[in-house]
């Protein structure tokens, strides 16, 4: 299992929880949950940058995830009430989308490696599937 898959899955699940929490809990509680999870995601994205095997696309996605997580930390402290609730939900949805994009990229990269190793092309794979 690659580190790309693990980190993207962690980000998707954790921020999915923030989306649910934004609708289930009070804005104050949601803000603290978003704050804590954003700190963890920022740390995860920072550590992930040290892995050169992730590729340029995944590293850029990690950078964007880090920027959104940093903004989430700031927004969790600065805003309150309904603004905090909807900002937390929006930021979490953005992070879920970025994590899903990373998971799709990881899958495509793995498939490309398998095809290169077996010597099959995409058209061969499509003919075999039909």
Image (cartoon, rainbow, N blue to C red):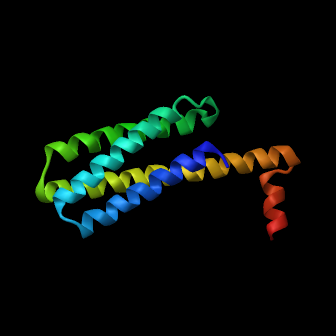
Can I make out residue 87 in this image? no
What is the quadrant of the C terminus in the image?
Answer: bottom right
Question: In screen coordinates, is 110 left or right of 29?
Answer: right
Q: Quadrant of residue 67?
A: top left
| Residue 46 image offset from top left, x and y in percent | 45, 33
Can I make out residue 42 in this image? yes
Look at 29% across and 55% down and name the residue there.
Answer: 90
Which of the two residues, 93 or 72, is positioned nearer the viewer here? Answer: 72
Farthest-out residue, left: 81
Look at 28% across and 45% down and name the residue there.
Answer: 72
Question: In screen coordinates, is 103 left or right of 64?
Answer: right
Q: Is residue 28 above or below residue 119?
A: below
Question: In screen coordinates, is 16 left or right of 88?
Answer: right
Question: In screen coordinates, is 73 left or right of 107?
Answer: left
Counting the numbered discs, the total is 0
Q: Is residue 115 above or below residue 67?
A: below
Look at 61% across and 34% down and name the residue there.
Answer: 55
Farthest-out residue, right: 119
| Residue 39 image offset from top left, x and y in percent | 34, 42
| Residue 50 image offset from top left, x and y in percent | 54, 28
Look at 66% across and 50% down and name the residue there.
Answer: 108
| Residue 80 image offset from top left, x and y in percent | 12, 52
């Amino acid at each position: 299992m690659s580190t790309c898959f693990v980190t993207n899955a962690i980000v998707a699940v954790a921020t999915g929880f923030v989306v649910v929490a934004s609708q289930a809990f009070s804005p104050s509680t949601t803000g603290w949950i978003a704050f804590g999870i954003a700190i963890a995601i920022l740390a995860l994205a920072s550590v992930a940058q040290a892995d050169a095997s992730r590729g340029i696309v995944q590293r850029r996605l990690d950078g964007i995830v880090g920027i959104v997580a940093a903004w989430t930390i700031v927004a969790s402290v600065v805003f309150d009430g309904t603004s905090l609730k909807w900002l937390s939900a929006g930021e979490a949805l953005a992070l879920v989308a970025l994590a899903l994009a990373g998971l799709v990229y990881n899958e495509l990269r793995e498939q490309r490696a398998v095809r290169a190793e077996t010597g099959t092309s995409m058209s061969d794979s499509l003919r075999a599937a039909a």
